[in-house]
Image: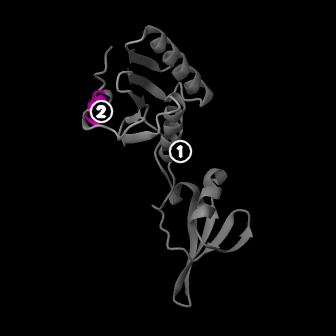
Amino acid sequence: MSKITVECTDPDGKEIYDRIIQTNLEDLVLGKSVLQVVMICNLDEPYFTIGALPKSTSRAVSLRDIAEISEESKQDGKVIKKLNIIDETYAPKLLEKINVIDQPSRLEIITDSDIELNTKIYDAKDEFIDKVLDFMNRVFPEGMRVRQTLHGKSIVMVASEKPIAPEWLKEAKDLKEKLENSLVRY
């Protein structure tokens, strides 16, 4: 389970946000994928900051992981490739990225798309980031509609009713840096 830290001047608010974070991590099945979550609640301004440090995700899936190019020919100035699927797991993602001219069988695809064996087909990191952002949006209070997100190894979002002030953004950048250097200790 994720380490959760809520910094809030209101003890009841701290307890409530701790539960909200736990519930949403569970609902989105993120508990084991996120190492640490830090929420800073500034009730005076008001603005809220949430930072999450995810575990590293698996590597991206390239064409070479799911198919091999068995034939290549030129036709009307285009390069036509015959792909043989060797792992069907990400075949639907492949089909979204290429122009399919023909599909003689379930495991054979003819395409004129410009693809190489190193072409990225799927990266779990992209979906994971969307899931973490969804988590953060669920945790923030309803009226906090102005948001700014920073991400790298960690993901930090600031939310407020007003435009994001430079000092709030600096606080968010500092939190991001601390999370990425695993220095957050509360």
Pointer 1 with pointer 2, Cβ within 8 A:
no
Residue 145 is covered by the magenta coloring: no
From the viewer's side, name the closer residue of 29 and 67: 29
Point 50% across, 33% down: residue: 143
Q: Which residues are the magenta region?
A: 168-178
Q: Residue at the location (57% across, 26% down)?
A: 24
What residue is disc 1 on? 127
Residue 81 sits above or below residue 129 on the image: below
Residue bearing the label numbered 2: 168
Residue 40 percent coordinates (x, y):
37, 23
Residue 145, percent across and down?
Answer: 47, 39
How many numbered badges does the structure rendering display?
2
Q: What is the three-letter code of the residue carrying label 1?
A: Glu
Please indicate whether residue 87 sits to the left or right of residue 127 in the image.
right
Residue 102, image x, y percentages: 69, 75
Above or below: residue 74 compared with residue 44:
below
What amino acid type is highlighted by mark number 2? Trp
- Who is closer to the viewer here, 59 or 83? 59
Sequence-wise first label, 1 or 2: 1
Taking the image as shown, residue 67 lies to the left or right of residue 36, namely right
- Side (left or right) of 176 relative to 136: left
Q: Mark 2 falls on what kind of element?
A: helix
Query: For residue 92, which quarter of the picture?
Result: bottom right
Rendering colour mode: one colour
Q: x, y (%) of residue 74?
A: 54, 86
Give the residue drawn at x 51%, y 40%: 128
